[in-house]
Structure formats: structure tokens, C-alpha cells
Image (cartoon, rainbow, N blue to C red):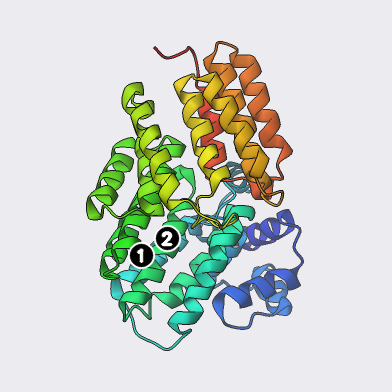
Amino acid sequence: MSSAVGELIRQLRLGKGWSQGKLAAELSGVSGFNMSREYISRQWESGRSEPSAFWLRHLATVLDCPLSMLEGDVKRREFLSHLAATSVAPVVASDLLAQGFSEVLHSTGPGVDEWEAKLLQYGTDYMSQGAADIQRRLAADLVVLQQQLDSPRMWAVAARLMTLFAKTYPGSDGNKAISWYSMAAEAADRSEDAEIRVWVRGRAAIALGYEGASLPVAQTFADQALAISERHSLGRLNALWGKAHAAVLRGDSRTGRQLIDAGRREFDRSYSEEQTSDYAVPWWRMNVFLSLLAARLGDEQLAVRAQQDARRDLPSQLPRFATHLDMHQGLMLARAGDRTGGIATARSALDALPPEKHSLTLRMLMSEVESQTSVRA
């Protein structure tokens, strides 16, 4: 084993502020096999032995780096530059899970009731925790779940977890996120549940539309969701708002405003009482959607009103969404011609949020603010 790889593991561990014991505990947790501090110290970091392919994958997962970095002689500065670029789990997790889902293995594990309870917990955790933590946990759970896909209810759980996994995927490879949204839609179809089928596609549409990413795909997911069922649901609500964002970003303000009205009507029938779950759209969250949409339209009056309504009911334990609203103000300034002030406002809001709570969506929003050059017609 090259001593550079052992040094790389050590530098990554130190970069996260972890002891060798902490790294051992993390590896044991995600792998299901015991790893000791002594082994990490005497074998890997000393350069005496090389981690197997199994342990390399898990090292890549817990240390937040691509597997290729641990397999080759990579300079420390290259490794650190990668850490600066992304805070979410590595590419290897997606590749491993995609292969596992295609094989649909069978084994014992948690029952469907336990999985549904876990699903609800993820819905809450997503709203307040960082993308890296959520994705790491999801990767471990999806490896187990992919072996238990033997009923429509299990496919329904898988579809929603896969949708969340796509949402936390790094922006360095947007195609991976699209791939996971597509697989989630296929999984939803196997659930034989129209509401799940609509929700997965609607959630993908609003995620991509809000991020301003892959707009034709967002449009397709939205249209599919709306065609599956005319029954009022949160899936239709998400699909309408996703379609509205896609329209406005394409420059079709008229259609965007029509979809705002349709989204409001759907909200009146499908709103959520639950305030802190990704599976819910309460009043404050709808206004977060509307705030960004109005900023993109250049409608300051509508944006300000939506921001005020959102802040009034936004739960205090969800600071990331307050950051969204502040960054929307930065986008409005930039669109109105004050690009310097807009960027400063958005950057200040992002920097005030602890880095571990940053999301791909916020990074993409910052890029959108920085890209503004003039007000759209």
C-alpha cells in the first residue's frame, strides 16, 4: 500500500476533527462490521496494509470523498479542494446502490411498519439536518431496503427514500440526481399507489424547478404527475409549483402566473397541517416557493408579501428556510440592477448559516444570484 493513501486517510480524519476511535465507530456503524482504532492506526494509517475494496467504499462514504481518491496517489491539496467543493456523500454510494436495486436481492430485515416509521423520521430530519448527514444515513438504509423489495408497500417506501436521496445528491454530477429521480418514479409505479406515483414525480418537479436545473426534465415529471391522477394531493401541488418555476425560468411569465393561481387553488384543497416534514406543504412552505417564483418574475410586491407570510409561520427550528428567504431578497436586488448589493445580501445570508446545514439548493441559488446581469423582459 502506498504510504500516501494512509496519509490521505489520516488527513481526512483530522480534517473532520475525528480521532481514530471516532473513525472506527463510524465505519462500524455504516458497515455492520466491527472496526477497531488499533487496526486503523497500526495497519492503514501506518501504511502496513491496504483497505479491501469493501472498506475503501465505506471509508469513502464516512470521509466524504470519491473512492478514486483513496485508490490512487492523490496529493493532499487535491483532496482538500474536493472537500471545499462539496459537503455531501461520494459518488461511490450512488453506484453501489444503483447496482443493488437492479438486483433486488432478498433477505430478512426491518418490517414494512418499521420502514414506514423510518421514512417519517427522514421527512422531518431532512428539513433541519445537513445534506451530508442525511445522504450517508440514506445510503446505509437503502442498501438494506433494496434486499426487501417484495411488496408494493416496500416499493412505496423505497420510492420516497430514493427521491430524498436524489435531492441530496451533489451538484457536481446533476445527471446522477436525474437518474435517481427516474428510478424513484419507476419504484413508485411498482407500489401500485397512484398517490405515491404522483408525489414522487411532483417532488422531483418542484426540486428541479426550484433549483433551476434540468427544466425539461422538471416539466416532464410535472406533466406525468398531473396526468396520473386528477385527485387533489400534495403531489399535484408540488407538480404545479415545479411547472410554474420551469415556465418562468424559460421566460414564459404569463404561464407562470397562471400556474401560481392553479397552485394556490390546489393548496386550498391539499395543504398540510404538519409543519416540519419534507412530505408536507404547509402555508409557510408554499410561500417560500412563491417568494422565489416572484423574485424570478421581478414582482417585488408579490415577493415581499410571500416572504412576510412565510416568516410569520416558519418554525424556528428550520433556519435553512429563513436563509432561502434572505437569498430571495438578494436575487430581487440583483434582478433590479443592484448586482453587487444582491450578491452581498445573498452571500451574507448563506455565510450566516452553519456550513453543515448548507444544501445543494442553496448553493445553486447563490449561483443564480451571481449570474444575474439584467432584468428580464
Residue position for label 1: 98
- Residue 223 quadrant: top left
Quick one: which residue is furthest to the left in this view? 227
Q: Which mark is residue 14?
A: none
Could you tell me the amino acid type at mark 1? Answer: Ala
Asked whether residue 52 is in view, the answer is: no
Out of 359 and 55, give the one closest to the viewer: 359
Marks 2,1: beta carbons within 8 A: yes
Give residue 224's position: percent from left, percent from top: 25, 49
- Residue 229 quadrant: bottom left
Residue position for label 2: 94
Q: Please tell me how crowded label 1 is: few (under 14), some (14-19), or many (20+) other residues with Cα within 10 Å.
A: some
Could you tell me the amino acid type at mark 2? Answer: Ser
Q: How many marks?
A: 2
Q: Residue at x 56, y 58 (%)?
A: 274
Give residue 228's position: percent from left, percent from top: 24, 55
